[in-house]
Amino acid sequence: MINRSINRGRPTSFNEFGRKAIKSLIWIYLVLLIVEGAIRKWVLPELSAPLLIVRDPIVLFIYFIALFLGLFHRQKMLLVVFFLAFSFTVVSAYEHLVNPNRYIFVTLYGLRTYFLHLPLIFIVPLVFTRADFDRMGFWLCVVAIPMALLVMLQFQSAPDHILNRTSTGEGKQIESAMGKIRPAGTFSFITGVAQYYALVTAFILYGVAEAGKLPKALMLSAGVSLMCALAVSGSRTAVMSCGIVFGMLLVGCVVRPEMARHLYKLLILGGVAALFAASSDVFNEGVKIMTVRNELARGVEGSDGFYLRILDGFLEPFLVMERTPFFGHGAGVGTNVGAQLIAGELKFLLAEGEWLRTILEVGPLLGTAYLSFRVILFLWLGWLSCCSARRGDLLPLLLFGACGPIILTGGFGQATTLGFTCLGAGLCLAAANLPDIHHENFARRKLRVRSPGKHAAIRSHAQDWA
C-alpha cells in the first residue's frame, strides 16, 4: 500500500492547502497533456521544441510541494526510481568526462525522459479521492466528443491541410490507406489519440459498472465518439489499446463472477452507440479504409506480422547486447529530440522500439535494470488491480488496461506517451489504494453491531485515506 499520510507535524489547514495545490497541478498537467500538441501545431509552431517540455515545470512544482509536505517518505518503489536516476546520472557524467564531444543537452533530455515524470506515479495516490475520479471521468468523456469531431474532420481533410500538420507546424501526419492520414486530434501523433481514448474507454466502462457515476447520455455520446474516432483512426494500435481495456472488464468478471451482471448493460450501451455511429457516412468510410489498411499490412507482414512485431520488440534487445557498448551510446541519443540536436532532423538514430532504444542508449547493465523496473511496476499494478477487482472495484483494473501496455513498451522519448504513462499509472495506483466502497460498507455494518468504538476507528482510517 502507498503511504498516504501527510506530515503530521504541520497544521492540518496547511496540509490541506498543499494537497489541494498538488491536485490542481495534476489537473493542469492533464489539460496541458491534451492541448500541448494543438499549441505546437497551430498556435506557436515556432516554439514547438520548448513546448515539448511545457509540463516539466508543473511536475517540478508538484515535487517541491510534495517534498515540503514529506510525501516522499517511505515509498519503496520511489526509492528504486531515485537509485536508478542516481546511477544513470553518475554513468552519464563519467561518459562525458571520458568523451567530452558528447552532446550534453542530449544527455540531459535523455535523463529527463527516463526519470523526471516517474515520481508523479507515486504522488497521485496521495491526493486523489473517489470524487476526483468521478470528476475526471466526467470531463474526459465530455472532451472525447469534440475530440472525435476533430479527428473525423482531419480524416476528411486533405493530407496537406492545416489540420493535419505535424508538431513542427509543417509536413503531414502518417499515412493510413487510400490517400488518408492517421488523424492526431489535438495531439502531435496518432499515439496520443490511442492513449487518450483508452483512458476514456476505462471511464465509460467504469460508468457502466458503477451506476450513477456518469450520466447515461454522456456515456452514450462518449461511446459513439469512441467508435467514430477508432473507425477513422487508421491505427491498429488505437483499436488494440481500447480492446485491451475491454479485455480487463472480462478479466474482472473472471476474478469476481458476479460482476458479469454488468455485461448486459454494456451490450445495450454498445449496441445503441453502434447504431448511432453506423448512421454516419464518415464512420462507414473509416471502417472501409481500416479494413483496407489491415489487408495491406497483412500483405507486407503476414497474417501474424503485427503480433510478431510486438514479440520482436521484447526479444531483439537481448540479441544486440553483446554488440552494444557497456554504457551504451548515451542517454537521449535514440530520441527524436536527440536526433534533431545531433543530425539536424527528426528520425530514429538507434531504434524505434522502446526496449531496444533503452539498451542501445544506456547499455546492457543499466538498460536491463531500467526495463526490469518497468516490468515490476507493470506486474505490481496488475496485481493490485486484480485484488481490487476481487473486492468488487473494477476501476483500477480498467485503468490498468489503459496504462499497462505503455508502462511495459511505451516510448518514453515521445512526450505524450510519457505523460499518459505516468498519469495513467498514478491514477491506477490511486484507485487501487482507495478504500473499496462495497467492502467498507460491509465492514461498517459488521462493526456497528459488534463495537461502536471500532466503527469510529474504521471511519477515522477511511478519512485518512481520503
Image (cartoon, helix red, strand yellow):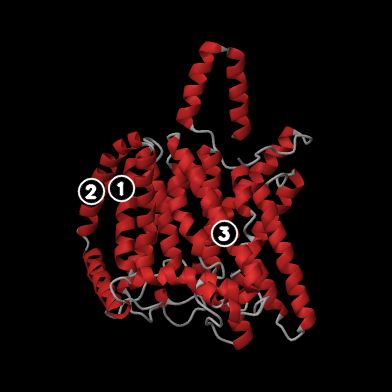
Q: Quadrant of residue 45?
A: bottom right
- Indicate whether 400 appears above or below 165: above
- Indicate whether 12 appears above or below 97: above
Residue at left 60%, top 34%?
A: 465
Q: Is residue 135 left or right of residue 360?
A: left
Neighbours of disc 1 within 10 Å: few (<14), some (14-19), many (20+): some
Closest to the camera, between mark 3 and mark 2, is 3
Q: Is residue 438 left or right of residue 111?
A: left
Residue type (three-letter) at the residue carrying disc 2: Val
Residue type (three-letter) at the residue carrying disc 3: Arg
Check disc 3 and report the residue beneath it.
374
Q: Is residue 291 left or right of residue 59?
A: left
Closest to the camera, between mark 1 and mark 3, is 3
Judged from the image, the secondary structure of the residue bearing numbered disc 3 is: helix
**Quarter occupied by the C terminus:** top right
Give the image location of residue 204, x and y in percent: 37, 47
Judged from the image, the secondary structure of the residue bearing numbered disc 2 is: helix
